[in-house]
Amino acid sequence: ELKVEQNPLFLSMQEGKNYTIYCNYSTTSDRLYWYRQDPGKSLESLFVLLSNGAVKQEGRLMASLDTKARLSTLHITAAVHDLSATYFCAVQETSGSRLTFGEGTQLTVNP
Amino acid sequence: DTAVSQTPKYLVTQMGNDKSIKCEQNLGHDTMYWYKQDSKKFLKIMFSYNNKELIINETVPNRFSPKSPDKAHLNLHINSLELGDSAVYFCASSQGGLAGNQETQYFGPGTRLLVL
């Protein structure tokens, strides 16, 4: 059974600081997704990483994938309050369309 | 235009009742999903349909029954509701549902179910 673990689960940081969220998974996969969820809202797709070494950037967020280490990172640069949300990674099984989600990282950016 | 829509948005009901949640997508996708998000925000897939055919059927109580009348709609019927069914239920859709394809899933707004 595919397991996906994120850490940290809770992250409180100051505006302007950098930090990284980690996503580890237990079986072979080369398709990993990052989603954002604001309180009381739906999930919004942020990044799709489809191969080893893939790196995607959007604004202050950058995601990368290392399939050999079974690790993805979501790096936050110079955080701003608007980035406060819960971030989920999700791993797609190689045999189908099923996504297994991590527990989510609740990010709070303080002024 | 809303891509993935769900109704109702909120549902408050008594234990033992039967209720349905409806989902529609206008993205032309072939695959639709139901997820349950618990109070700790953990997301777990329940069911998935590809072109009206059930392809993922997780271990959920058989009180939960999905129905897909066509590939743009996936409904969830829940019988004999229990307190533990209280959660947010998300519908999602994706393009193909086939092995090996990139499968960004687009989520609906969620249905907040509270069983009293």
Image: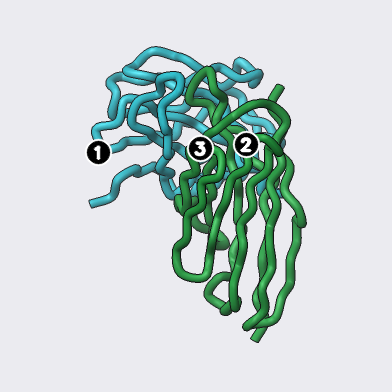
State the residue at coordinates (49%, 49%). B10
Q: Mark 1 points at which residue?
A: B26
Contact (Cβ within 8 Å) of mark 2 with mark 3: yes
| Any part of residue B116 in sight | no
Which of the chains is green? A
**3D distance between C-alphas at marks 1 and 3:** 29 Å
Amino acid on which the number 3 mark rests in the picture? Ser
Q: Residues within 10 Å of mark 3 (few under 14, many from 20)?
A: some
* Lateral position of residue B39 relative to residue A35, left or right: right
State the residue at coordinates (46%, 30%): B33
Q: Position of residue A43 (x, y in %)?
A: 49, 51
Frontmost residue, B112 versus A57: A57
Q: In terms of image quadrants, where is residue A90?
A: top right
Up-down: is A67 above or below B108? above
Q: Quadrant of the N terminus of chain A?
A: top right
Q: Earlier along the polypeptide chain: callout 2 or callout 3?
A: 3
Residue A51 has which mark?
3
Residue type beneath disc 1: Asn
Determine the residue positioned at 63% across, 42% down.
A66
Residue depicted at x 61% and y 42%: B37
User: Could you tell me if the residues under marks 1 and 3 are in contact, i.e. CB atoms within 8 Å?
Assistant: no
